[in-house]
Image (spheres, rainbow, N blue to C red):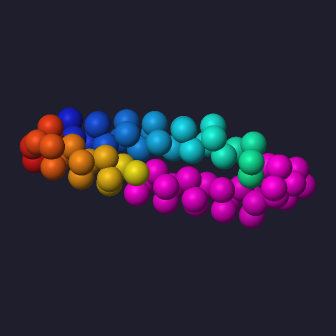
């Protein structure tokens, strides 16, 4: 149960950092008009989910390798 909580927290933290870092850039490059449509935001959130998933897997792998997590 605690593994799921740790994994969820790591995912949310990475997702939040991704949003803070790239939100302004995506709006600037895509334009305000494109950002207002669902298609423009869809690509941003897809990349956010993919980045967060990959980052979470990497962090969990490192924690497992360092014997911090035992499951």
Residue at position x 26%, y 42% from top? Answer: 4
Observer able to see residue 38: yes
Residue shown at the point (81%, 56%) measured from the top left: 29
Q: Which quarter shows the N terminus?
A: top left
* Principal secondary structure, stretch drawn in magenta: helix
Q: Position of residue 18 (x, y in %)?
A: 57, 44
Is residue 59 one of those drawn in magenta?
no
Residue 40 highlighted magenta (yes or no)? yes
Is the residue 37 above or below the residue 9 in the image? below
- Residue 36 seen by the camera: no
The residue located at (46%, 51%) in the rendering is 52
* 28 on left or right of 59: right
Measuring from the top left, give residue 49's x and y in whole percent.
Answer: 51, 55
- Which range is magenta? 27-54
Quick one: which residue is furthest to the right in this view?
A: 33
- Image position of 46 with respect to 67: above or below: below
């Amino acid at each position: 149960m605690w593994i799921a909580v740790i994994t969820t927290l790591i995912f949310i933290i990475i997702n939040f950092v991704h949003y803070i870092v790239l939100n302004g850039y995506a709006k600037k490059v895509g334009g305000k008009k494109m950002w207002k449509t669902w298609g423009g935001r869809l690509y941003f959130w897809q990349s956010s989910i993919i980045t967060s998933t990959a980052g979470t897997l990497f962090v969990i792998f490192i924690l497992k390798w360092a014997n911090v997590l035992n499951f």
